Amino acid sequence: MRVIGVVGAGTMGSGIAQVFAQSGLTVRLHDTSRAALDNGRRAIDKSLAKFVEKGTTTAAARDETIARLQPTTTLDDLADAECVIEAIVEAIDAKRDLFHRLDTLTSSHTILASNTSSISITTLAAATRRPQLVIGMHFMNPVPLMPLVELVRGQATSRETPNTAVELCKTIGKTGVEAADYPGFISNRILMPMINEAIFAVMEGVGSPQSIDTVMKLGMNHPMGPLTLADFIGLDVCLAILRVLHDGLGDPKYRPCPLLVRMVAAGQLGRKSGQGFYAYT
């Protein structure tokens, strides 16, 4: 592949665009908002500057990476992409609408991928005329540093499409691991109940956020406590994933903690809002 499309210039989309551009591919990064594109570009510049500072890349390589990034507010500019990766808001209707539009404007051979963390790939694929070429490519945050990509086959995804996705992951120095199309896939089906239980522990007074995170770091050897991680992911994102798990699997053990629901309603979303289980300035 030579041209990759990325839709959504937020934290995940800009990170995905960066790793493909660093690997020598032309990247057309789309967002409906020029401000979002500008913010995404600044995030990429900052990330690349850290790589240069640490000596893991050169200034010349950084400049070449930036030259391969082509931001655009026009979705039609992605028409020649050989793979388009969607990284927009975690809302099924918005994603299905986007997949339908991408299906009409790209080549019939183009792979359409979603960075969704929990939404059914089968449902997204049904919005297209090429369900065999639709796959989940769930990157981990921060994308430039995390080596895993969760690859999710929908009901109609062909055998060849995951094989292509695995090779694409190798191109950008990532490891692709296949997961079945169940709510939350592998990563969030295991991670989110742990985060949810940590929030229940806060609500019930079992421990403070600091004490809970310290127990998990020092006692379980986790690099980051579950509440710090929840703030990093975004409490609204955690809530959305838990609701997908609860609705999709019908098991009360996935019921979102009422404290999480209240915090999201209050706009306390974690790092991105400046306040979650911890305060950020």
Image (tube, rainbow, N blue to C red):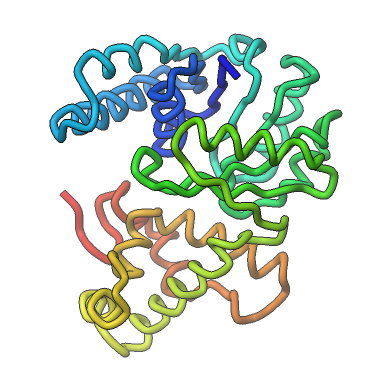
Q: Residue at x 37, y 62 (%)?
A: 230
* Front-lying residue, 105 or 64: 64
Please name the residue shown 65% across and 70% down the image. 246
Q: Is 272 left, or right, of 33 in this rendering?
A: left
Give left or right: position of 173 versus 271. right
Give whichever of 168, 88 is nearer the camera.
168
Tell me the quarter of the image containing the N terminus.
top right
Reply above or below: 5 against 64.
below
Estimate the x, y position of residue 241 in percent, counting from the top left: 56, 59
Say which residue appears at 72% left-offset and 74% top-offset. 250
Taking 127 as reference, is 118 above or below it?
below
Residue at the location (56% across, 12% down)?
A: 74
Q: Is residue 44 above or below residue 198?
A: above
Q: Which quadrant of the figure has residue 167?
A: top right
How many marks on residues?
0
Left/right of residue 59 with respect to residue 227 in the rendered view: left
Query: In which image quadrant can residue 160 be found?
Result: top right
The spot of residue 2 in percent (x, y) is 56, 15
Position in image of residue 184 (x %, y %)? 61, 60
The location of residue 248, given as percent across then percent down, is: 72, 65
